[in-house]
Amino acid sequence: MTFATQRSLLPSLGALQAFEAAARHGSFTRAAEELNLTQGAVSRQVAALEQTLGVPLFERVRQRVTLTPAGLAYAAEIRDALSRIAAATMSAMAFRGAGGTLALAILPTFGTRWLIPRLPDFFQKHPEVTIDFATRIRPFDFRQEPLDAAIHFGDPTWPGAAMHRLMGEVIVPVASPDLIARVGLKEPADVLRAPLLQQSTRPRAWAEWLERQGLAPAQALLGPSFEQFAMVAQAAVAGLGMAIVPRMLVEEELRSGALAVPFDRPIDSRQGYWLVYPEEKRDRPPIVAFRDWLLAQCGRDPG
């Protein structure tokens, strides 16, 4: 389908906004109030849209309107499309010379404990750049998300994206001092007597650590599971079990004594942290500024 053909299928933006508001509120009257239009104007916009599409989007019963199955599916798509248009508009408005807005996906615990404390230096050096943060814990399709870049942990596989390795990580077993004393954690084999806290995006973390200690990983998946490292760390502080975590993400708990490493058996992760972004955005000024700064923070050559 050519762009000219696609353009001929595009309804007016006003009709789409009227439909989305009416779909969200389930009311033409409330949609009119939000858009500062009359109820009749909203009704006409929606009717014109239905005529263009050739399908009814609402069922009208007395003073109420409800979405038809076609309307329900269309509303979800249009809401996403309008959000993307708004985000693109904000990004364009934010440009100041070499500046602009960077929509960045970060890993929650890595973001709060490693990245954000370092960001004042970035903003001091690049006041012309604005960063909008979102959290993602798994890879995603940049074509389906209103995001410019992401910090990813894993292997260097992300189709259609440029990837820059930031760092590896050292993995350590940690537990609360109370649990260490209660279970008698003195050597690696003692781990098998303790509850093992799981991190859902790293399902083989305990198995890998146990295997490298020469221990059978039979119990590696037994124990409560959490989605984020911050939750795993807090569960360990509460004495719910042992955690296997990147040391850099629990430095605060180790300094305070809330957690301890019962035996010095760290392992280097086989994976790493990566900055990723679509190849076609490689030369966008906000990405260039953030990429070069971040690589320097990680001791990597921006070149």
Image (cartoon, rainbow, N blue to C red):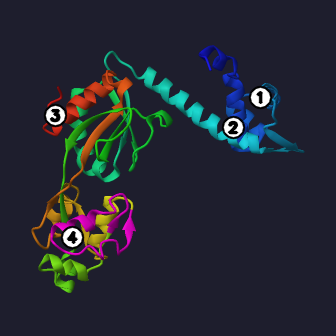
Is the residue marked by circle 3 packed among few (<14), some (14-19), or many (20+) residues within 10 Å? few
User: What is the three-letter code of the residue carrying label 1?
Assistant: Leu
The answer to whether the residue labelled 4 contacts the one labelled 3, judged by CB atoms less than 8 Å apart, is: no
Q: Does 232 appear above or below 20? A: below
Q: Amino acid at mark 4?
A: Leu
Of mark 4 and mark 3, the one earlier in the sequence is 4
Q: Which residue is mark 3?
A: 296
**Residue 282 on the magenta segment:** no
Q: Are marks 1 and 3 in contact (CB under 8 Å)?
A: no
Residue on which disc 2 sits? 74
Q: Earlier in the sequence, mark 1 or mark 3?
A: 1
Q: Secondary structure at mark 3?
A: helix
Quarter residue 241 falls in: bottom left
x and y percentages locating residue 5 in the rendered image: 66, 17
Q: In the image, which is nearer the foreground, mark 2 or mark 3? A: 2
C-alpha span from label 4 to label 2: 50 Å
Please give the range of residues in magenta: 198-226
Q: Which mark is residue 210?
A: 4
Asked whether residue 237 is in view, the answer is yes
Marks 3 and 2: in contact by CB < 8 Å?
no
Q: Which residue is mark 1?
A: 53
Q: Nearer the viewer, residue 300 or 279?
A: 279
Q: Would you identify the image quadrant in which residue 177 lies?
A: bottom left
Disc on the earlier residue, 1 or 2: 1
